Image (cartoon, rainbow, N blue to C red):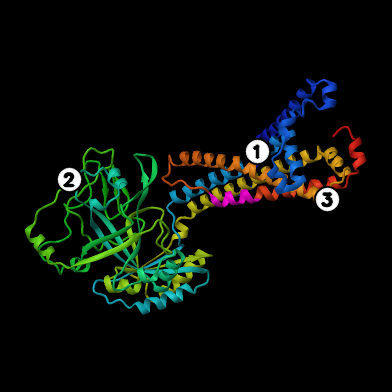
Amino acid sequence: MKLYVTIESIIAACVIALITVLISAWIPSKRATKITPIDAIRLSKDIVVNPGEVKTSKITYKLFGLEGMIAKKHFKRSRKKYRATIVSLFISIVLFISTISFCTYLTDSITSVFQDSDYDIIYRYVFKKGESIDLSELTRVYSELSAADGVFSSNYVLTNTLSDFKIPKSMLSNEFVEYFNLPEETTEVPINIIIYGIADDVYKNYLKENNLKEEIYMDESNPKGMAQALISRFDPALQRYVKIPIFKENTIILDYKDYDEIRDGQAFENDSWTNENDNLTNENDSQTLKNGNQTFENGNQTLKNDSQNIEENDNRTAENFSLTNKDNSQVSQIIENNSQTRENRQNLSFKSLTFDITDKDLVLGLNESFNNSVKIMYPISVYQELFNADYCTFFFKTKTHAETYDIIKNSLTAKGMLSGEHTLVNVYEIHETERSMVIIIKVFSYGFITLISLIAIANVFNTISTNIMLRRREFAMLKSVGMTSKGFNKMMNFECILYGFKSLAWGIPAAFGVTWLIYQNIARGYDTRFYIPWEAVAIAICSVFVVVFATMVYSMRKIKRDNPIDALKNENL
């Protein structure tokens, strides 16, 4: 990439700077021409105040002494200069917080829109039907691969998929029901549930980071998992990215039949869960939920769980249940009555699937930009007692993805673990274009924030230092009547506090209002919640007082070096 600066941008910058300087000089000169010489000498236009308006309260005198009272009288007597400083600080605060809000919302929307993942390399070991799982051997291989050059973070999970799990409509969120336009007669909706077994130490760290109790979420006698239950995808009809919560409540208890018995055909012989006619598609241009992924074919919008690339070992589908979006006219549910099937299903044992829903990230490897399924985590000690894993997945976060990928590939090839269905994918390379775009957006955002911050600081510094310089005669008079350096410092500190609190009292609410307007515009194309960048607010509050106090110290050092007699003689002040 080469640095490219256009002539047009340079000319535009020069013209804008020239116009700004001319306007800044023209406004005071125009005002000066309208003032008579005698009024200018008497400063009758600069200081217009009635005697009663400069009175200060006794509380001010008791709290801040004579110096505080003099500072308060100055603000009341020179309101224009005082207001100019407050306005300068106000604009700086609003610009700073609003700019950070805009850049934060922009960056979040861009990173969420791109199909991104929180890992660079993924390896999947698929278990064959009836294969005994030697977890100790897999963890040994995982530990060896995690120690490869370039790997700085890693994780492994066991995975079990409950395809097209029937969830009662009463448990679904209102947003889900409204978005898919479910009819009143609908009683169940098929949705994929993906269950993960997480290493106990990793799961404990996750609970600790999120202030969750181990005795609740690692109880083998009463297992309770943590889950994400969200449909996030691009809606072509609405032309925006949407996020739809699946469940109504935050704590969910589902009764489900032993999935492994059903999958292996032990429950019944004559009734198969696979039925060519029982799928989630609607030939008449309907929106389909199928295996939780998202595809588009002949106008059908199908959710197929592309984010997890689940092997379709389990082809258990719902009984011809189809969903249409708001733009479609009809949603139908056809359930075939099969007495033998019902009898066999009644003989199956029920299990209780209990989990809490979180809106935070899960462990490394389970966070995708697009999601169309319920993802539940259990500690591996609990998971092995409840489920038979379909496959084991290794996730690696690397510094040098290409070199590390080759190292891992060679190691797995030597062990004979890359044959058949076992796969290794360099995810970083696949999403490199999207990552580059995100980096460009972040560089632009941080550069813009830095530029606005420098402008705001320069603006405040110039305004306050100029006002202090114009008060040289006032300070010389106070010094001549006996005010000490300690008294000057006390008076200036009081003025700094007044400047800071007054500007923040006006600036922060205004910045929140601008942030709300930014959110409203971003929300038109990206489904997100309203939030305030509190870090920016804290930085703004601290920066206001730091800049104001620093400017006061700088200006007062120059004032203190003045000779009071020379300052009093100077008629230009």
Rate crowding at label 2 as few (under 14), some (14 to 19) or many (20 or more) other CA atoms within 10 Å. Answer: few
**Picture quarter containing residue 467?**
top right
Rate crowding at label 1 as few (under 14), some (14 to 19) or many (20 or more) other CA atoms within 10 Å. Answer: few
Q: Is residue 223 left or right of residue 362?
A: left
Question: Quick check: can you spot residue 3?
Answer: no
Tag 2, which secondary structure?
A: loop
Q: Is residue 535 magenta?
A: yes
Residue in the picture at 32% in, 50% down:
294
**Picture quarter containing residue 568?**
top right
Tell me the kind of residue under disc 3: Ser
Near-viewer residue (10 or 78):
78
Dominant SS of magenta comes to helix
The residue that disc 2 covers is: 185
Find residue 181 and report its horizontal and vertical position in percent.
26, 42
Q: Assess whether mark 2 and mark 3 are in contact (beta carbons under 8 angstroms).
A: no
Q: Is residue 186 magenta?
A: no
Tag 1, which secondary structure?
A: loop
Tell me the kind of residue under disc 2: Glu
Find residue 312 and report its horizontal and vertical position in percent.
27, 61
The residue that disc 3 covers is: 485
Residue in the picture at 39% in, 73% down:
200
Find residue 252 and report its horizontal and vertical position in percent.
29, 59
